[in-house]
Image: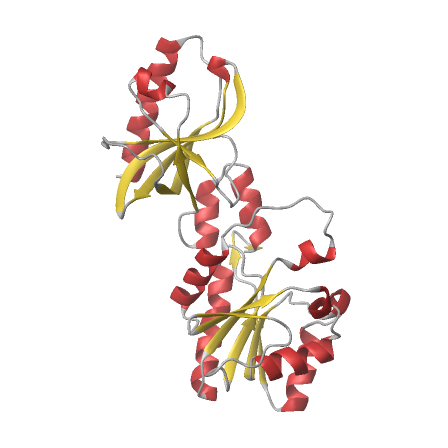
């Protein structure tokens, strides 16, 4: 049972107790999250049950602040589940975020969810974990409740990169600024997006550089620019160059995601394309004309081939 979706009143899933539990949003499943899952795995062996990663859908802020702007996640839920499972979680519990769940006191959340639904005998959390109504519960609260109920508790210290804690917000900031190399360091893998290939203006084809235009990307986009990437379609990986942003040379202001698969020939329309970012090559900028743009595209493709080969 790699993943189970739980409403607040659902019974404990079969095989959960006695479990070692780590709770969090786990957006991005970065290297700090991996250290939590590793700790839960160690505790699971001591308590003789599964390691359970617990996340929320939708993110709690969307329920608490329904009129706030929607922020795309770093990982879609199916990808988050896959990554948590690969990290060593035996089960992933996705809690349905509701006003009733968020209104629970820390004590009620502990007894009803952590002990009741999840069957925890060990709890592992990061240094900044908060829980319960208005985030009034802290790790000191959780430690006290665990000790009183005979549960083990471990607070995992922050994992740092360049002397700063790794966090989902730090990954997001790096991506929005176009620093996909830093995002890779924080995540422990290349950041990836996925979308459906749709028809575009087909201008790249007329220039000799056909591109796959992506739509329906549900996760955070790196900042505008040209990137060296790896493109994965139908189980095959291709070196590629990707442009995110407008096309100022042709007076187009709309943001696009265009990917040129180096060496590929064929029809991708309707296919799902995954794009893994390696490094940023340059900023988006206008060119004096088609010839200047074409020469730059040649340089971009060679740079992408070198960076991803």
Q: Residue at x 59, y 50 (%)?
A: 169
- Looking at the rendered image, the quarter that the C terminus falls into is top left
Q: Is residue 231 above or below residue 118?
A: above
Q: Quadrant of the N terminus?
A: bottom left
Type of colouring: secondary structure
- Residue 279 vs residue 285: left or right? left
Q: Residue at x 48, y 24 (%)?
A: 284
Q: Does 191 appear above or below 212?
A: below
Rendering quarter of residue 150: bottom right
- Residue at position x 59%, y 80% from top? 117
When asked about the image quadrant of residue 210, the answer is: top left
146 relative to 122 in the view: left or right: right
Identify whether 204 is placed above or below 18.
above
Residue 174 at x, y percent in the picture = 53, 43
Q: Position of residue 239 (x, y in %)?
A: 28, 37
Residue nearest the observer in this picture, 268 or 47: 268
Does residue 24 appear in this view?
Answer: yes
Q: Is residue 109 above or below residue 296?
A: below
Q: Residue at x 65, y 90 (%)?
A: 149
Camera-side residue: 276 or 58?
Answer: 58
Residue 30: tell me if it is visible: no
């Amino acid at each position: 049972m790699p993943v189970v979706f739980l409403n607040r009143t659902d019974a404990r899933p079969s095989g959960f107790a006695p479990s070692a539990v780590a709770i969090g949003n786990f957006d991005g499943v970065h290297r700090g999250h991996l250290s939590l899952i590793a700790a839960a795995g160690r505790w699971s062996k001591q308590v003789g049950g599964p390691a359970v990663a617990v996340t929320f859908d939708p993110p709690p802020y969307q329920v608490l602040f329904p009129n706030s702007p929607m922020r795309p996640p770093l990982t879609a839920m199916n990808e988050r589940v896959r990554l948590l499972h690969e990290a060593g979680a035996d089960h992933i519990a996705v809690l349905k975020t509701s006003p009733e769940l968020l209104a629970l006191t820390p004590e009620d959340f502990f007894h009803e969810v952590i002990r009741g639904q999840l069957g925890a005998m060990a709890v592992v959390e990061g240094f900044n974990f908060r829980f319960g109504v208005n985030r009034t519960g802290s790790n000191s609260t959780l430690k006290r409740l665990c000790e009183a109920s005979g549960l083990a508790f471990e607070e995992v210290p922050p994992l740092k990169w360049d002397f700063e804690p790794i966090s989902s917000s730090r990954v997001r900031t790096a991506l929005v600024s176009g620093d996909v190399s830093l995002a890779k360091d924080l995540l422990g893998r290349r950041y990836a997006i996925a979308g459906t290939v749709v028809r575009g203006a087909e201008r790249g084809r007329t220039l000799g550089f056909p591109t796959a235009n992506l739509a329906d990307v549900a996760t955070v986009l790196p900042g505008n620019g040209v990137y060296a990437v790896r493109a994965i379609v139908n189980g095959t990986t291709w070196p590629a160059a990707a442009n995110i942003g407008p096309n100022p040379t042709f007076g187009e202001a709309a943001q696009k995601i265009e990917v040129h698969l180096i060496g590929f020939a064929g029809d991708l329309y309707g296919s799902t394309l995954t794009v893994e970012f390696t490094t940023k090559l340059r900023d988006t900028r206008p060119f004096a004309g088609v010839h200047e743009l074409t020469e730059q595209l040649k340089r971009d493709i060679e740079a992408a081939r070198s960076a991803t080969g």
